[in-house]
């Protein structure tokens, strides 16, 4: 935990130096850094941040003292012509402008978008993660490696049963990962229901959309496409269907984070069980089953 705190202090300093935002390194660092795309659902993450902010604003001082401070940190690149991805980034930065200047909230919530995300910045960001978000719509994500990097660096995952999350869960156990949302086999049926107007928006998400449309985060016309994707767009990526599960799972993350010893145990056990994803195992398996090659002795190596 001392190593993790040192990594968080390093990231907090980088954020302060580059974005001029003061982040408490003792808060829960909630990180989502990856290509900006609707199927990866950064929009669900920032909707969840807005919902958290709206709840905090309704709490009395005594209740606020019981809340876990959180820094929601985003990063990633959008394709040049991908208008919706650019809109998601705009909403993230707009929410940050409102939340980060709210003195009533203070360190209980900070929102940061790290610009020009790249590998050098990943080296600072990934080791500082307490929880990382891998929340793609089930059945849409290939078996990527970013979630593996986060767990290997002692961070836990909040995610759907999709992509490598499934493989990681198999290795580290369900007790050490925060899973949410519908399964891949449910997706087509849910989309079918949406197309025929048989699904109403989740009430929690409706509250978020109302705040956006009321101009709480700037000109609502900027985000009209993002909102219409949930309504006239038939919510293809099932943000509404998974939103309540997402919020409830984030509440579970908060409760778990309060028990520092339990959190440390989950972190250590996760790292210890990630050996399956080592490069040695992967390369040996590829060599054996795909490339059909055998290892050759290294020159000068003793047999």
Image (cartoon, grey):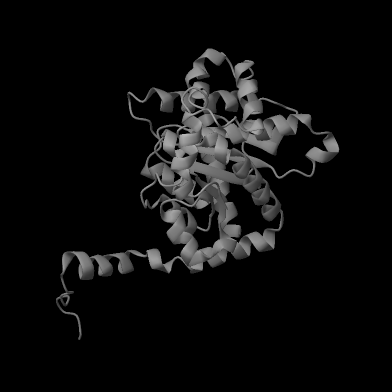
* Residue 70 showing in the rendered view: yes
In the image, residue 53 above or below residue 148: above
Residue nearest the observer in this picture, 30 or 18: 30
* Residue 16 showing in the rendered view: no
Give coordinates of residue 231: x percent, y percent.
Answer: 52, 24
Quadrant of the rendering where the N terminus is positioned: bottom right
Q: Residue at x 37, y 52 (%)?
A: 143
Residue most extreme to the bottom: 303
Residue nearest the observer in this picture, 9 or 77: 77
Give coordinates of residue 150: x percent, y percent.
Answer: 47, 53
Give coordinates of residue 288: x percent, y percent.
Answer: 22, 71
291 to the left or right of 148: left
Q: Residue at x 27, y 68 (%)?
A: 285
The answer to which image quadrant residue 112 occupies is top right
Give coordinates of residue 75: x percent, y percent.
Answer: 46, 37
Q: Residue at x 55, y 31 (%)?
A: 198
57 to the left or right of 78: right
Q: Residue at x 68, y 46 (%)?
A: 251
Residue nearest the observer in this picture, 22 or 51: 51
């Amino acid at each position: 935990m001392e190593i993790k705190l040192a990594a968080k202090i390093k990231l907090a300093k980088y954020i302060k130096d580059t974005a001029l935002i003061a982040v408490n390194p003792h808060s829960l660092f909630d990180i989502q850094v990856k290509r900006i795309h609707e199927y990866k659902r950064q929009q669900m993450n920032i909707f969840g941040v807005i919902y958290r902010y709206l709840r905090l604003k309704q709490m009395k001082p005594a209740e606020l003292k019981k809340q876990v401070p959180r820094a929601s940190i985003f990063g990633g690149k959008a394709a040049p012509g991908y208008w919706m991805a650019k809109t998601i980034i705009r909403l993230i930065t707009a929410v940050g402008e409102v939340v980060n200047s709210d003195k009533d909230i203070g360190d209980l919530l900070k929102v940061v978008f790290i610009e020009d995300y790249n590998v050098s910045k990943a080296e600072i960001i990934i080791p500082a993660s307490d929880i990382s978000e891998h929340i793609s719509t089930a059945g849409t994500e290939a078996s990527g490696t970013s979630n593996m990097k986060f767990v290997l660096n002692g961070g836990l995952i909040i995610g759907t049963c999709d992509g490598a999350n499934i493989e990681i869960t198999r290795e580290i156990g369900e007790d050490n990962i925060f899973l949410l949302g519908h399964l891949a086999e449910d997706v087509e049926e849910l989309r079918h229901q949406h197309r025929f107007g048989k699904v109403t928006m989740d009430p929690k998400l409706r509250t978020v959309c109302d705040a956006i449309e009321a101009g709480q985060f700037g000109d609502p016309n900027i985000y009209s496409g993002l909102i219409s994707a949930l309504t006239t767009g038939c919510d293809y990526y099932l943000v509404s269907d998974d939103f309540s599960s997402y919020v409830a799972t984030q509440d579970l993350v908060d409760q778990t984070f309060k028990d520092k010893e339990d959190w440390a145990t989950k972190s250590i056990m996760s790292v210890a069980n990630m050996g399956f994803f080592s490069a040695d195992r992967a390369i040996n398996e590829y060599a054996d089953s795909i490339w059909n090659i055998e290892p050759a002795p290294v020159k000068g190596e003793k047999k």
